[in-house]
Image: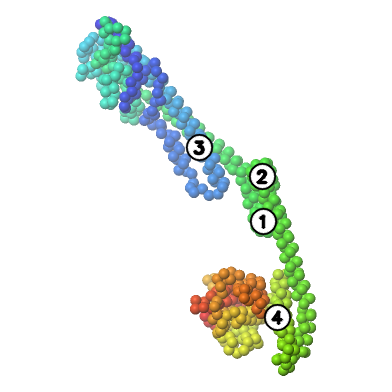
């Protein structure tokens, strides 16, 4: 009997067995990583990570918030990863050391009691065994239970935790000590099951030990270990918070260093867009931002040189046009006087009369072109001024039409005399009206109509509206964006026409000089429509003007 008992106590130090839902432990093997126990505070890092991610503003706008968020996220991930790894390793070490200590003490206590247990044991033998084990560890808060063939003994008398089926099956079938961590009323507990085995005294050294059927169970609280885990979680959270604060400070400093040249570049580009082409950036360092600043300076210098050259050429062109136009006015005036004196007087059919007619027409066209160039030169030089006078707009338009075209060539719908008065430049209004009607007669088809009225915009500002329509083919769509450009002709067949291509450009300049606007469009039924809107400036003594619109 003595030999068999000795064999039984040696078997309690056998190899570890692993079963679903239970953990085995031994002192002669390297312990495997222990899963996290379900204790309060163990989910702290996960909750902290979720709360931190929930505070990240989405969507982030601007480069500075994105850089700051990137630095903070990287620092947070590093801090949490380091903290989680440290927590896992420290927790594993604490729990592994605790369970190894408990299992070794439990095994030692069983080894001390096993020689005095008779087999098969009765109820009194089981109770005596658990009492002796508890007495040897009376200050540890242990609870002991022994089972054999349906008999159970407890020390203290009751209150042992309910064992899981996995633990019972593992202890019944295996020969190694088995342990399992569980929660009981929210408190972590370690439950250890240790089967007692025996070997026959006549057997050799390598004989397989046999299960005796006696199993000792231990329940021990892990309150101390829970405190260690909670302290670790609290420390990791505080360290992570400090790391995040440092990360924010470092992110602000880093973002400021990165964004300083970017902000300088933004200010420089805005100044360049405002026309200050002499702006330059200070180049410091040798990184990519310094290369960008250097490239910006080179681009700005080349742009300044190119624009200065273009402005010089443009000024030379304007001066050339003005000088040529001015120099041509005197000989053209003399030529016009000569053609008037050399009127053929009934010799239109002769060669001399035909030659004089061609000279007169050419001189008149050249005089008109010179006058248009002089007008354009004044607009380019900023010398064009308005000489406003309060006039009857309808009467001014009637005089313009009557002085240039025969009755019936232009249909009008105008307010009555004295109804629509405004302060405008009469000469420039005459130019606008004459150019629009002349363009419609040359390139459209009759009937040409002119209407005038008053219209209020969405802001309640009254405007004079003049519309000139024709019944021609309209304006080609490809020509619409260029219709008010200088020397532009919508058809190549008009390259040698009487039009110089300056009439609509001069009209648009005169309208803008009055603070108005002009636009061109095609009518659905065919034909083109030109619409001029001029601000309705009146004297305080003026009565409100009436009039309709189309």
Which residue is disc 2 drawn over? 290
- Of tags 1 and 3, which is closer to the observer? 1
What separation in Å lies between label 3 and label 2 (alpha carbons)?
Answer: 31 Å
Which residue is disc 1 drawn over? 272
What separation in Å lies between label 4 and label 3 (alpha carbons)?
Answer: 81 Å
Residue 230: image quadrant is top left
Badge 1 or badge 4: first in the primary sequence: 1
Q: Answer with left or right where residue 2 lies relative to residue 324.
A: left
- Report crowding for label 2: few under 14, some 14 to 19, many 20 or more residues within 10 A (C-alpha): some
Residue at image position (38%, 25%) is 223
- Of tags 2 and 4, which is closer to the observer? 4
Which residue is disc 3 drawn over? 76
Badge 4 or badge 3: first in the primary sequence: 3
Badge 3 or badge 2: first in the primary sequence: 3
Q: Which mark is residue 365?
A: 4
- Coordinates of residue 444 in the picture (x, y in percent): 57, 80
What separation in Å lies between label 1 and label 3 (alpha carbons)?
Answer: 41 Å
In the depicted structure, whether residue 402 falls above or below residue 369: below
Residue 399 seen anywhere in this rendered image of the structure: no
- Coordinates of residue 500 in the picture (x, y in percent): 67, 76
Residue 399: image quadrant is bottom right
Badge 2 or badge 4: first in the primary sequence: 2
What separation in Å lies between label 1 and label 4 (alpha carbons)?
Answer: 44 Å
Mark 1 touching mark 4, by CB under 8 A?
no
Residue at image position (65%, 86%) is 404
Residue at image position (62%, 89%) is 406
Badge 1 or badge 2: first in the primary sequence: 1
Q: Nearer the viewer, residue 165 or 446?
A: 446
């Amino acid at each position: 009997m003595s030999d068999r008992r000795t064999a039984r106590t040696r078997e309690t130090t056998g190899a570890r067995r692993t079963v679903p839902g239970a953990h085995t432990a031994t002192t002669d093997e390297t312990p495997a990583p222990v899963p996290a126990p379900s204790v309060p505070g163990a989910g702290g890092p996960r909750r902290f990570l979720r709360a931190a991610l929930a505070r990240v503003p989405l969507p982030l706008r601007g480069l500075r918030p994105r850089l700051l968020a990137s630095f903070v996220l990287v620092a947070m991930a590093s801090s949490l990863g380091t903290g989680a790894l440290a927590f896992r390793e420290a927790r594993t070490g604490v729990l592994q050391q605790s369970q190894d200590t408990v299992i070794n003490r439990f095994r030692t206590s069983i080894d001390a009691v096993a020689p005095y247990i008779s087999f098969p044991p009765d109820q009194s033998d089981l109770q005596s065994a658990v009492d002796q084990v508890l007495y040897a560890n009376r200050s540890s808060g242990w609870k002991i239970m022994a089972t054999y063939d349906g008999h159970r003994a407890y020390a203290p008398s009751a209150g042992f935790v309910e064992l899981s089926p996995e633990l019972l099956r593992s202890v019944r079938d295996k020969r190694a000590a088995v342990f399992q961590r569980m929660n009981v009323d929210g408190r972590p507990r370690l439950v250890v099951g240790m089967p007692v085995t025996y070997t026959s005294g006549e057997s050799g050294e390598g004989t397989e030990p046999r299960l005796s059927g006696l199993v000792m169970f231990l329940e021990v609280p892990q309150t101390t270990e829970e405190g260690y885990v909670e302290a670790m979680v609290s420390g990791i959270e505080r360290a992570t918070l400090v790391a995040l604060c440092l990360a924010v400070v470092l992110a602000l400093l880093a973002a400021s260093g990165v964004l300083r040249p970017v902000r300088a570049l933004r200010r420089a580009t805005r100044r360049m867009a405002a026309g200050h082409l002499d702006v330059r950036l200070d180049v410091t360092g040798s990184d990519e931002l310094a290369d960008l600043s250097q490239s910006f300076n080179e681009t700005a210098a080349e742009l300044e040189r190119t624009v200065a050259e273009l402005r010089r050429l443009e000024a030379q062109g304007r001066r050339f046009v003005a000088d040529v136009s001015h120099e041509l006015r005197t000989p053209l005036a003399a030529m016009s006087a000569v053609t008037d004196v050399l009127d053929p007087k009934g010799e239109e059919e002769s060669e001399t009369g035909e030659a004089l007619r061609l000279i007169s027409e050419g001189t008149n066209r050249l005089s008109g072109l010179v006058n248009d160039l002089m007008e354009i030169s004044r607009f380019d030089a900023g010398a064009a001024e308005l000489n406003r006078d309060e006039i009857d707009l309808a009467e001014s338009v009637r005089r313009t039409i009557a002085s240039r075209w025969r009755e019936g060539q232009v249909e009008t719908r105008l307010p009555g005399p004295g109804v629509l008065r405004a302060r405008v430049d009469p000469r420039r209004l005459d130019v606008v009206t004459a150019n629009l009607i002349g363009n419609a007669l040359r390139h459209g088809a009759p009937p040409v109509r002119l209407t005038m009225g008053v219209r209020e915009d969405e802001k309640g500002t009254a405007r004079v509206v003049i519309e000139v329509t024709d019944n021609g083919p309209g304006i080609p769509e490809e020509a619409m964006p260029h219709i008010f450009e200088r020397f532009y002709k919508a058809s190549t067949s008009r390259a040698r026409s009487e039009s110089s291509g300056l009439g609509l450009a001069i009209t648009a300049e005169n309208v803008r000089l009055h603070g108005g606007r002009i636009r061109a469009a095609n009518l659905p039924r065919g034909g083109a429509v030109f619409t001029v809107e001029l601000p309705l400036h009146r004297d305080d003594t003026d009565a409100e003007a009436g009039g309709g619109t189309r």
